[in-house]
Image (cartoon, rainbow, N blue to C red):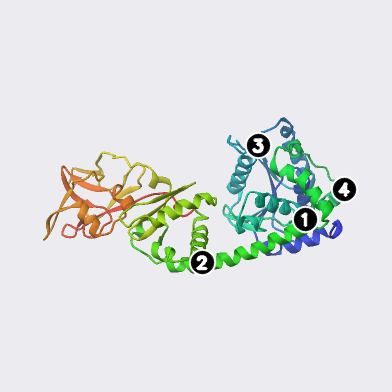
Amino acid sequence: MGQPSIDLPSRLLRSLTPWLDAAHWRIAFSGGLDSTVLLHLLATLAKSESLPPLRAIHVHHGLQAAADAWPAHCQAVCDALGIPLQIVHVTVQKGASLERAARDARYAAFTSATRINDVLMTGQHRDDQAETLLFRLLRGAGVRGLSGMPATRALGQGSLVRPLLDVTRSELQAYAQDHGLLWVEDPSNQDRQFSRNYLRHQVMPLLAGRWPQAHASMARSAAHLREAQGLLDELAQIDLAQASMPGGFEWSGLPSLEFAAIAGLSDARQRNALSHWLEPLTRLPDTDHWSGWIDLRDAGNDAAPVWRLADGELHRSVGRLWWLSGQWLRTPVVSGSWHDLSSELRLPHNGHVMFIGQTPVGPLQIRYRQGGEVMDLAGRGHRDLKRLLNERAVPGFVRGRLPLLFRDEELLAVANLPGLDGSALQGWRLHWQPSDEDQGLR
C-alpha cells in the first residue's frame, strides 16, 4: 500500500524542490484520477508554500463522444481551485497505432505550451512505470527503453517532470477518496484491445496476485536500468568526443562525425555511440534496422552509402558521417536571374546566397552543377569543376547543391569554397547559407 495518502503533499514537495525557481508550473490535466490528484495536491501546497504560478492544460483529442464533456469538467475543477486552464484542441493523425498518434498529438501540444524555464508536470505513477517496463520488454526494447519513463526530461523550452513516479495508484485513489475528489473515467481505458489496457487489467493483477510486490520490483528494475543507461551515455560521450573533431564544411550546419573513430570501436560501442548521437535527431531504429548501419560502414571507399532513418539520412562521405534532414533532402530548384545584387537571393529548398564585399558586374544567375563545367583560374587556366571539387574533398551530397555563379555561360564562382568563391582582385565573395532550418534537433 505504501505510505498513507496524508503524507503525499510533503513527498510531492520534496520531489519538486529542484524546480521551485521555475517560471511556471503547468499541470497536464486530463480530468482523470492521476492528474486530478496532482492538481489538487499542488493547489493545496500553494496555500502554504511559495510555489511558482500554477496553470493547467487540457488536451482534447476529439476521439470519442464521452470526451466532449471533459473540457467543461476540467474547467469547473480548475475554477474551484483557482487555477487558470488552457484547453487545446488537437487533430490525431490516422495510423497503425491510435495510442501512439494520440500521444504524439498530446505531447506536441505540451511542447508548444512550455516556455523558457517552465515545468510541465504529468501524473504518471509507479504502477504506470511497471506497466511501461513490461510493455517494452514484450516489444524487445533495449536498456534505454527498459529504463522506463524518466522522472524529468527536456520539453520544448522547459522541462517535463513526473513527480508521482514513486506513488502507487492505490495511494492516489485513497487521497482522492479522502478529499472527495471527482474525476472522469475514460471508457477507452477499459478496451482491452489496447495493449496497455490488456496488461493493466489482465496481466498485472495476475502477477500481483502471485508476487504482491511486483509493481515495486519492476519499478525498481527500471531504476537500475536507468542507471545502466546513464553509464552507457557516459561511454558514448567519451567515444563521440574522439569522433567530433572538426572536419571542414562547418558552414553547412550539418552534424557530422569522423568515420574512422566510430568504425574503430567494437560493434556494441558503435551502436551505443551512434544511438546517443542520433537520439536528438531522429526516432531511433529498431534492432533489425541496424543492418543499414552495417551496410553503410562496410561499403567500399569509392561508394557513397546512405542509411535512411525515420527523420532523415546518414551519409558517409570524405571520411565522415553526415546527418541530413529537412531541406538537405529536397532537390534545389534554379531560381532564375539575380537582379538585386545588393540583397540576398533566396534559393528554393536551398537557403540563400549573398555577396560579401563588392558585387560583380551582371547580368548574373545562380545555377547548379550539371557536369562538364569549367572554371578559369588565375595562373592555372581552365580547370574542370569536378577536379576542383575533388581537390577540396567536397562531400558528394553537397556538390549538386553548391550555388554556382554564372555570367552568361562563364562560371565566375563556387559559393563557400576558398579560392573559388569570388575574386580577391575585385574584392567580392559569394557566400551561401545552405539552410534556414535547425539540422541539430528534430
Q: Earlier in the sequence, mark 3 or mark 2?
A: 3
Residue 305 visible in rendering: yes
Q: Badge 2, how many Cα within 10 Å: few under 14, some, many 20+?
A: some
Q: Earlier in the sequence, mark 1 or mark 4?
A: 4
Horizontal side of 48 relative to 142 (left or right) equals: right
Q: Earlier in the sequence, mark 1 or mark 3?
A: 3
Residue 61 is labelled as 3
For the residues labelled 2 and 1, the Cα–Cα distance comes to: 33 Å
Residue lying at the far top in this picture: please name it: 65
Q: Earlier in the sequence, mark 2 or mark 1?
A: 1
Q: Are marks 3 and 2 in contact (CB under 8 Å)?
A: no
The residue tagged 2 is: 237
Q: Earlier in the sequence, mark 4 or mark 2?
A: 4
Q: Are marks 4 and 2 in contact (CB under 8 Å)?
A: no
**Which residue is drawn at the image coordinates 60% and 43% (left, top)?**
104
**Which residue is drawn at the image coordinates 74% and 53% (left, top)?**
125
Amino acid type at mark 3: His
Residue 360 visible in rendering: no
Amino acid type at mark 4: Gln
Amino acid type at mark 2: Gln
Closer to viewer: mark 4 or mark 2: 2
The residue tagged 1 is: 215
Residue 177 is labelled as 4
For the residues labelled 1 and 4, the Cα–Cα distance comes to: 22 Å
For the residues labelled 3 and 4, the Cα–Cα distance comes to: 28 Å
